[in-house]
Image: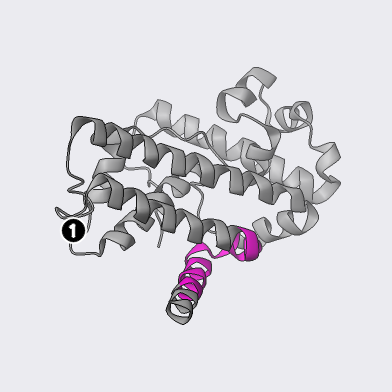
Amino acid sequence: MHMIRQVQPSTSLRERNRLATWQLIHDTAAELVLKHGIAAATVEAIAERAGCSRRTFFNYFATKEDAILGMRELRLDPDDVRAIAAAEPAAAPFDRTMRILITILSEIYPVPGRYDRRRALLEKVPELKSRFIENISSAEGLVLEYLRHDAELGDAHEGLGPDIDADEARVLLTLAAAIIRYAATHDADNMLVDRDAALRRATKRFREVIEHTL
């Protein structure tokens, strides 16, 4: 399941250049860490090797860790979240809720593939995993903001189904976020390498525990 936005022919030259610069800085940072370690991957060193200024670096990445992992700032408004929720209306409400969170996380980590390099980075610098968990919280917060906004307006969450009210939507979100957090904590390497498989295992585990303990 690839959720990256592919560059279409209609994409402006400016946007293509921005994507190319973003990719160059990310690749440079990742390779620098793999070859020389995290201490050598300063913002200055990354920028110099990528052929850009420190100011340009921070136009694309908030921290050097973000550049190493290939993370970008999350910029989705409630309308974007609403559109994600409304896609595939035949899917179960929980599946759609999970898709909202996963799609948002995919916006944060837009580069598919390169799993071997990402695994090597995590093995070399285990503390990078904490940034991924932080972004789960950011994604959850964005969806909660959307839910609160619609609840204040008294709108039904038609994206999750006409029978799902705001409180039920929050419960679904809490469950989806808990599964993602569980996978990120207990299957962290695979969550960043083969996210869909890790989430399937985590969801299966939650179902087994719930069925066994109810």
Residue 9 appears in view: no
Front-most of 170 and 45? 170
Q: Residue furthest left?
A: 162
The answer to whether 88 appears left or right of 62 in the picture is left
Residue 124, percent across and down?
79, 55
Residue 110, percent across and down?
48, 46
Front-most of 88 and 201? 201
Q: Residue furthest bottom?
A: 212
Residue 123, percent across and down?
76, 59
Q: Is residue 213 above or below residue 143?
A: below
Q: Which residues are magenta?
A: 185-206
Residue at x 24% of width, y 64% of height: 91
Q: Secondary structure at mark 1?
A: loop
Residue bearing the label numbered 1: 89
Residue 188 appears in view: yes
The answer to whether 5 appears left or right of 125 in the picture is left
The answer to whether 210 appears left or right of 9 in the picture is right
Q: Specify the quadrant of the image occupied by residue 8.
A: top left
Residue type of the residue flagged with mark 1 = Pro
Residue 209, percent across and down?
50, 76
Q: Residues within 10 Å of mark 1 (few under 14, many from 20)?
A: few
Front-most of 17 and 210? 210
Q: Quadrant of the C terminus?
A: bottom left
What type of secondary structure mainly makes up the magenta span? helix
Residue at x 73% of width, y 47% of height: 31
Q: Quadrant of the N terminus?
A: bottom left
